[in-house]
Image: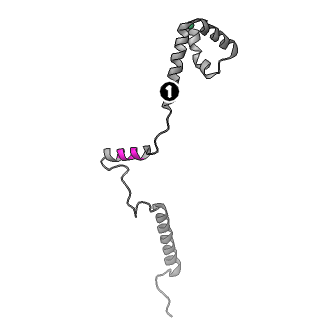
Amino acid sequence: MDHKQAQDEFSDYVDGTLAQPARAELDQHLAVCIQCRTELAKFRQTLGSLGRLKQTAPATLLTDVKQQIYRRSRGRFFAPRWKLFGRIPFEWISLATIIAMLVYYLAILHGSPTGVRPAP
Ligand SMILES: [Zn+2]
């Protein structure tokens, strides 16, 4: 096993997924090769640095991003909604209006077809 072969297997070796004959060969090579032991140490150090990057986002990230977009767009995006009218479900209002118009239409159509009430 040469240095190139050894270093190609570092990833599997560190993950513990390197199969046994290859693992034993790599162990033997590392026992006698200072260059590859140094490379392996660097590899593990890099993995450790990458692992420390996996931090969770702060809880305020979303609001911070929205505020920044709001500021940079000069209020065009993510403007704070009005307290009273911001949360009105316009879908339901539209539906209620359509139903009211339908009821009105049916009442006019079937209530008095000619528009003239019969004399009492
Ligand atoms: Zn080597």
Quarter of the view holding residue 15: top right
Where 41 sits versus 81, above or below? above
Q: Which residue is mark 1?
A: 50
Quarter of the rendered structure image containing ligand 1:
top right
Which is more toward the observer, 69 or 120? 69
Residue 86 is left or right of residue 113, and the answer is left
Where 101 sits versus 77, above or below? below
Where 83 sits versus 49, above or below? below
Residue 9 % position (x, y): 59, 15
Residue 7 is left or right of residue 97, and the answer is right
| Extreme residue toward the bottom, this view | 120
Where 21 sits versus 91, above or below? above
Residue 44 % position (x, y): 54, 20
Q: What is the chief secondary structure element of the magenta stretch?
A: helix
Residue 88 % position (x, y): 44, 62
Residue 68 % position (x, y): 35, 44
Amino acid carrying label 1: it is: Leu
Question: Which residue shows up at 47% across the image and 68% down it?
Answer: 97
| Extreme residue toward the left, this view | 74
Assign a secondary structure to mark 1. Answer: helix
Which is more toward the observer, 48 or 6? 48
Question: Which residue shows up at 48% across the image and 67% down it?
Answer: 98
Quarter of the view holding residue 8: top right
Mark 1 nearby-residue class (10 Å; few <14, some 14–19, many ≥20):
few
Question: Which residue shows up at 60% across the image and 9% down it?
Answer: 30
Q: Which residues are magenta?
A: 63-69
Q: Which corner quadrant holds the N terminus?
A: top right
Question: Which residue shows up at 58% across the image and 9% down it?
Answer: 5
